[in-house]
Image (cartoon, coloured by chain):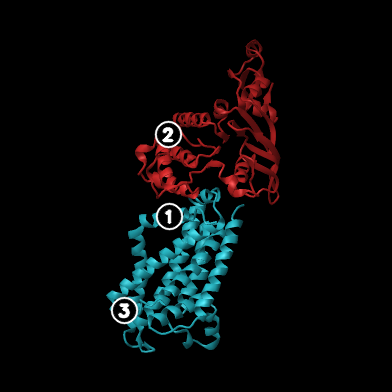
């Protein structure tokens, strides 16, 4: 069932390897700017549950970056599909939709994990070390990136052009990045706003990542929710790949 | 072997294929000719699983293209009209990924890739990035890639489009060489001389329907032996003749300039589709 899965994954990894230096630089820029602009600027002025804003911000950036980098696999698929026509090579190959989606999703998750490693290393320069040894921290990162990579693969099959792809980033990812508990605690918002934001998967990813990084127990609800949404999006991606044939 | 029965494809209000049917026996080089929009690429896309059919059915080596999709896909290699190589990967990596898609064991894959790179004369460029290759090299690489899993059927969709005449002829040689291995080759092309030179049989497709299927020689002999191109007002007209003597008699009455030449497949196509040839 997953024959050919390694080929799909390997192709993305080889491309990532070719662009590695550029990719690492681009993964570093946004978190670095947020840490300087918000982290330094806030200093010790704000404390959340006994943690500095810098300590609060880094888990949020981990959640945000794992989302954006996992979702960015959609752009690569889009380029391969509309510009290089490489998607046809996969469509004409004797591989199942599941093998294709699994390969692309795993590639998206790999990018996400690299970006998380970049943030944690940058965090060290800002003298922030949290409880990164907690397996639940990495489970939350993995589920978050699985969910958004699956979303990206599904949407990349539905869009009709490069322009549509960037619209998706503007309307789906950017608002979520700012509202999903990345930069501020959601419970400080008005009740109606907190209720809406509670529906965003990134809110639950930020919460789980932050609480595990702080050494607290996040409870299983966020993990179950991320797993359920991730599985649904993966199944939808399978369906979308089947429908990508004209 | 390729078997197609009553194949149809509609895009909204446009009928791209209106019930196409034919068989291509094993080992044959079958050329599928027609003007832009006739349905050539649509046929290949349906046979290779890139496009869904609206009606009819097709089999590749006996495997139904939908019910036995994965088995049918193991039967063919595909060279698309557009260059669909990974430009950021090397020549070897492109072939290696294709081999992995077909689940070929590592040792066998590496051996086959070396053999094919020798075959298409790209062994020296094995570690070059694809973006560094010329157009002709990329086409040869696409052919090599289509052969990595040793398919019995090869679909070539305009394999020489946009190439210089000498490189085109080099690719013709390669296609002939592949045919000698026993492969069934399904070729679409705009270059009529390509079909004349390569094909065992030719199908003329016009407006989504097959007009005729026959050998190039028989099609041309039905059209005549000699052709004269001349200007009729502001448009060119072609007139065909059975014998040279008939052509000479016609020439004797000509006041305008003209060109006398042998009949070619293009004349046959234009005659059979009712498009401006007199015979």
SS label for mark 3: loop
Q: For residue A68, what is the image quadrant? A: bottom left
Q: CA distance from mark 3 to mark 2?
A: 57 Å
Q: For residue A39, what is the image quadrant? A: bottom left
Which color has been applied to chain A in this rendered view? Answer: cyan
Of the 4 image quadrants, the one containing the C terminus of chain B is top right
Q: Is residue B189 visible?
A: no
Q: Nearer the viewer, residue B182 or B94?
A: B182
Q: Is residue B178 visible?
A: yes
Q: Mark 3–mark 1 contact, CB under 8 Å?
A: no
The lab-note entry on whether marks 2 and 1 share a chain reads no
- Disc assigned to residue A129: 3
Which chain does tag 1 point to? A
Residue A150 pos. (x, y %):
52, 65
SS label for mark 2: helix
* Chain shaded red: B
Total labels: the figure holds: 3
Residue B158 pos. (x, y %):
54, 37
Lateral position of residue B71 relative to residue A45, left or right: right
The lab-note entry on whether marks 3 and 2 share a chain reads no
Lateral position of residue A14 relative to residue B33, left or right: left
What residue is pinned by disc 1?
A10
Q: CA distance from mark 3 to mark 1?
A: 33 Å
Residue B160 pos. (x, y %):
50, 35
Q: Is residue A170 above or below residue A77?
A: below
Q: Residue at position x 54%, y 29% from top?
A: B194
- Within-10-Å neighbours for mark 2: few <14, some 14–19, many 20+: some
Which chain does tag 3 point to? A
Residue B239 pos. (x, y %):
65, 21
Which chain does tag 2 point to? B
- Disc assigned to residue B119: 2
């Amino acid at each position: 069932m997953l024959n050919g899965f390694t080929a799909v994954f390997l192709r993305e990894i080889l491309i990532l390897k070719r662009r590695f230096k550029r990719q690492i630089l681009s993964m570093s820029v946004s978190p670095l700017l947020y840490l300087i602009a918000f982290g330094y600027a806030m200093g010790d002025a704000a404390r959340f549950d006994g943690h500095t804003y810098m300590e609060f911000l880094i888990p949020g950036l981990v959640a945000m970056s794992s989302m954006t980098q996992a979702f960015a696999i959609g752009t690569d698929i889009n380029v391969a599909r509309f510009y290089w026509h490489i998607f046809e090579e996969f469509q004409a190959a004797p591989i199942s939709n599941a093998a294709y989606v699994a390969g692309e999703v795993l590639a998206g998750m790999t990018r996400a994990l690299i970006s998380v490693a970049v943030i944690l290393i940058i965090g060290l320069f800002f003298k922030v070390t949290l409880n990164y040894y907690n397996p639940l921290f990495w489970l939350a990162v993995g589920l978050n990136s699985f969910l958004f990579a699956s979303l990206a693969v599904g949407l990349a099959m539905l869009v009709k052009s490069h322009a549509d792809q960037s619209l998706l980033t503007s309307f789906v990812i950017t608002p979520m990045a700012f509202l999903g508990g990345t930069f501020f605690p959601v419970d400080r918002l008005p009740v109606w706003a907190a209720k809406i934001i509670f529906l965003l998967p990134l809110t639950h990813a930020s919460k789980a990542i932050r609480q595990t990084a702080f050494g607290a127990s996040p409870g299983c609800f966020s993990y179950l929710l991320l797993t359920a949404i991730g599985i649904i999006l993966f199944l939808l991606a399978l369906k979308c790949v089947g429908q990508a044939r004209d | 072997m390729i078997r197609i029965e009553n194949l149809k494809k509609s895009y909204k209000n446009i009928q791209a294929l209106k019930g196409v049917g034919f068989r291509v026996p094993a080992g044959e080089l079958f050329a599928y000719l027609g003007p832009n929009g006739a349905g050539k690429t649509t046929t290949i896309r349906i046979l290779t699983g890139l496009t869904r059919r609206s009606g009819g059915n097709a089999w590749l080596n006996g495997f139904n293209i939908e019910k036995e999709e994965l088995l049918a896909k193991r039967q063919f290699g595909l060279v698309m009209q557009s260059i669909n190589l990974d430009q950021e990967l090397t020549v070897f990596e492109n072939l290696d990924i294709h081999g992995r898609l077909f689940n070929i064991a590592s040792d066998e894959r590496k051996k086959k890739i070396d053999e094919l790179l020798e075959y298409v004369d790209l062994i020296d460029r094995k570690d070059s990035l694809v973006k560094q290759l010329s157009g002709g090299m990329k086409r040869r690489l696409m052919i090599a890639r289509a052969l990595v899993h040793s398919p019995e059927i090869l679909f070539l969709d305009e394999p020489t489009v946009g190439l210089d005449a000498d490189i085109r002829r080099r690719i013709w040689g390669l296609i002939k060489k592949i045919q000698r291995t026993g492969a069934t080759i399904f070729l679409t092309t705009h270059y009529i001389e390509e079909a004349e030179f390569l094909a065992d049989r030719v199908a003329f497709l016009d407006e989504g329907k097959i007009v005729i299927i026959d050998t190039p020689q028989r099609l041309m002999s039905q059209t005549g032996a000699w052709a004269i191109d001349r200007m009729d007002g502001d448009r060119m007209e072609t007139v065909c003749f059975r014998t040279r003597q008939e052509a000479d008699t016609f020439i004797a009455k000509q006041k305008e300039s003209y060109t006398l030449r042998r009949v070619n497949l293009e004349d046959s196509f234009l005659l059979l589709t009712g498009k401006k040839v007199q015979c």
